Amino acid sequence: MHGIILKTLQAFVVDTYGEDAWLAVQEEADIEEKVYVPVTVYPDGDVYEIARTAGELTDQSPRTILTQYGEWVVPALLETYDLHIDDEWEGLELIANIQQFHTSLRTRDMTTLTTPRIRSERIDENRVRITYDSDRKLCDVARGAIQGVAERFDEELIAEERTCMHEGAEECQFDIRRNVPRDAESERKSQSDTEAESKTGFEFESEPPTDAPSGGTND
């Protein structure tokens, strides 16, 4: 597992639940002696143990913790990899270019590290399909990251999870749609609806089960 994931996961726990919560996670997950460095590779199991332990301490499922982390980490990743992001992109454009973005990071950071396989397909101007395939089965992080992108770019995105590896599928597939009004009346209604909804302007049309994440250790 890329060290930047574990380092930012630690920062997420501290920022969201406090330093005492992280110390408790370290003790319970038996990782007290570890210091996570972005340029180092760590066992995949560390992520699962941190998510499991943080979930137990906060009375939430591990998958909920990973989704929260995915949303939280977006601003930090955008800042870290700013040079790879076009200033003209909006949220959906960033998502549409995630395959190219992901490939460049794989080449730049760690050529020996096995990373998830991510494919992006532009269906039309306002729709993108993302396919995620990894033995780690950390699709909940992707789910949260989509929400984080919507919030970061202040864009109303609606996502549908078509398939999920946790439900037996070979890959996870997300359809993300930008909500664009068709005419002025629709635009006024959209603005009214948006004000009544949450500030993120984001929703999933399907919700995942809350069982613990499971995955392999090599991909």
Image (tube, rainbow, N blue to C red):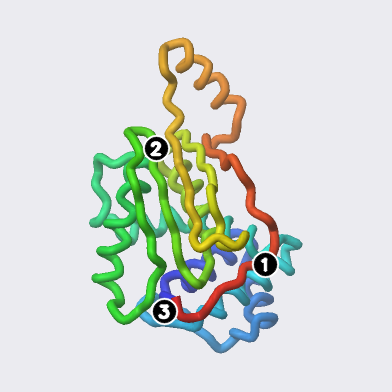
Q: Amino acid at mark 1?
A: Ala
Q: Amino acid at mark 3?
A: Val
- Looking at the rendered structure, the number of numbered marks drawn on it comes to 3
Query: Closer to us: mark 2 or mark 3?
Result: 2
* Distance in Å between CA atoms under marks 2 and 3: 36 Å
Say left or right for 13 vs 4: right
* Distance in Å between CA atoms under marks 1 and 2: 30 Å
The quarter of the displayed image where residue 1 is located: bottom left
Residue receiving disc 3: 37
Query: Closer to us: mark 3 or mark 1?
Result: 1
Residue receiving disc 1: 212
Give the SS element for disc 2.
Answer: strand
Q: Are marks 1 and 2 in contact (CB under 8 Å)?
A: no
Name the spot of residue 53 as percent of width and height, x first: 68, 73
Name the spot of residue 116 as percent of width and height, x first: 41, 67
- What residue is shown at x 33% (from left), y 42% (from top)? 122
- What residue is shown at x 50% (from left), y 72% (from top)? 135
Residue receiving disc 2: 127
Query: Closer to us: mark 1 or mark 2?
Result: 2
In this rendered view, identify the residue nearer to me: 168 or 196: 168
Q: Label for residue 194?
A: none
Q: Are marks 2 and 3 in contact (CB under 8 Å)?
A: no
- Label located before the other in sequence (3 or 1): 3
The image shows residue 204, relative to residue 60, as above or below, that is above
